[in-house]
Amino acid sequence: MKQKASSTEPSVRMLRVGEQVRHALSDVLSRGDVHDEALSKTPISVTEVRMSPDLRHALVFVKPLLGGNEEEVLTALKKNVRYLRGEVSKRVAMKFAASLKFKVDESFDEGSHIDSLLRTDKVARDVAKDEEE
């Protein structure tokens, strides 16, 4: 008997389509197909795409490489969303062209913050104290 996945977990189909959309967007942005100065001067990494269950909406997480001008890049992506949506629909075979919503991926910043916390003197003392006991 087949078990139904929990509602919070994305289906295999959502993950597969999200990955296809991510590859399509990465391709368009890396080739410089979008004629926007903010997008052409900054390399952008598309880190993740989360699809809605009906595959009509995509939340696209992006990170400008070297972490610079995130707001400028986000504004440029939003300004060119119609073009990007059209390019994705050409490259990914879907019944509907998914609407794209862009968001800056902050997971790298969180990872760096946690790493810096783990390297503080206080944590090093606590770890050394635990190892002695």
Image: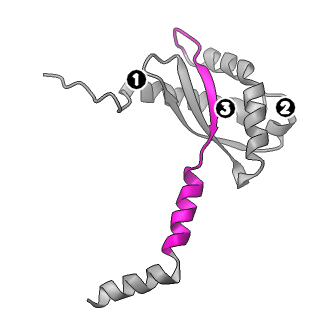
* Residue at 66% in and 19% down: 85
Disc 2 residue crowd, few under 14, some 14–19, many 20+, Cα 10 Å:
some
For the residues bearing labels 3 and 1, Cβ distance under 8 angstroms: no
Looking at the rendering, the stretch of residues picked out in magenta corresponds to 93-118
* Residue at 64% in and 32% down: 102
For marks 3 and 1, the one nearer the N-term is 1
Q: Is 73 contained in the magenta span? A: no
Rendering coords of residue 83 (x, y %) = 74, 19
Residue at the disc numbered 2: 36
In the rendered image, the vertical position of residue 128 relative to residue 79, given as above or below = below
In the rendered image, the vertical position of residue 35 relative to residue 127, given as above or below = above
Name the residue type under label 1.
Arg
**Mark 2 vs mark 1, CA separation in Å:** 32 Å
Which color scheme is applied?
A: one colour
Residue at the disc numbered 3: 27
* Residue at 35% in and 33% down: 9
Q: Answer left or right for 24 relative to 10.
A: right
* Residue at 51% in and 64% down: 114
Q: Tell me the element at label 1.
A: helix
Extreme residue toward the bottom, this view: 132
Residue at the disc numbered 1: 13
For marks 2 and 1, the one nearer the N-term is 1
Q: Answer left or right for 126 relative to 103.
A: left
Q: Is residue 2 visible?
A: yes
Q: Tell me the element at label 2.
A: loop
